[in-house]
Amino acid sequence: RAGNAPEDMGLLVSTVGTAASALLETRPGASIEEIESALTYLYTGVLGAAESVRVTGSGNTISITVKKPDIPDNKTVSTQFMGSPLASIAASIASEAFSKPVSIRLETSKKGQLEIELEVMDAGQ
């Protein structure tokens, strides 16, 4: 509850990405290289969930290619709203790095790789 009115009630959800970001020894800086390093550490090392990760960025868009993801492609209600576990992790890491909200704009799986596109939003959005 945030207040006494009925509309002041909400649902607090913790994502897979929030939990995974706690596994990092240090918070990544606001650069594509540091985000890629953090995701590589998590995806290929700690979680063993992918073969490799490539991160690029332009403007407020971050594009991530995950090669040979080893996470089932489950289409559930939660993944429709919060993205897959790997996309959730990427969004949480980017949000931590930039200290801004991040939205999963697009997520596609094809030919042994997962493509994730994130949007870094202004704090007012």
Image: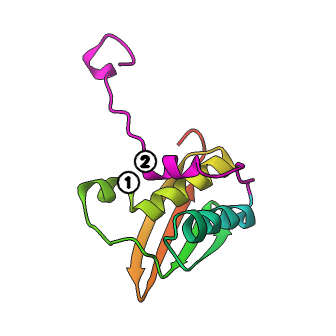
* In front: label 1 or label 2: 2
Asked which quadrant contains residue 43, the reply is bottom right
Q: Which residue is mark 2?
A: 15
Q: Which mark is residue 82?
A: 1
Q: Looking at the picture, does residue 45 appear above or below residue 1?
A: below
Query: Magenta residues, as a range?
Result: 1-30
Local secondary structure at mark 1: helix
Marks 1/2: CA distance?
A: 8 Å
Relative depth, front residue between 13 and 103: 13
Q: Quadrant of residue 9?
A: top left
The kind of residue on which mark 2 rests is Thr
Q: Residue at left 44%, top 52%?
A: 16
**Relative to residue 76, is residue 55 drawn left or right?**
right
- Compared with 123, 23 (above or below) is below
Residue type highlighted by circle 1: Met
* Residue at x-position 51% and y-position 57%: 89
Rendered position, 59 above or below 3: below
Q: Residue placed at 50% from the left, 47% from the top? A: 19
How many C-alpha atoms fall within 10 Å of the one at disc 1: few (<14), some, or many (≥20)?
Answer: some
Give 108 or 36, whichever is nearer the viewer: 36
For the residues labelled 1 and 2, say whether their Cβ atoms are less than 8 Å apart.
yes
Instruction: Give x and y (percent) for residue 82.
Output: 38, 54
Q: Mark 1 or mark 2: which comes first in sequence?
A: 2
108 within the magenta span: no
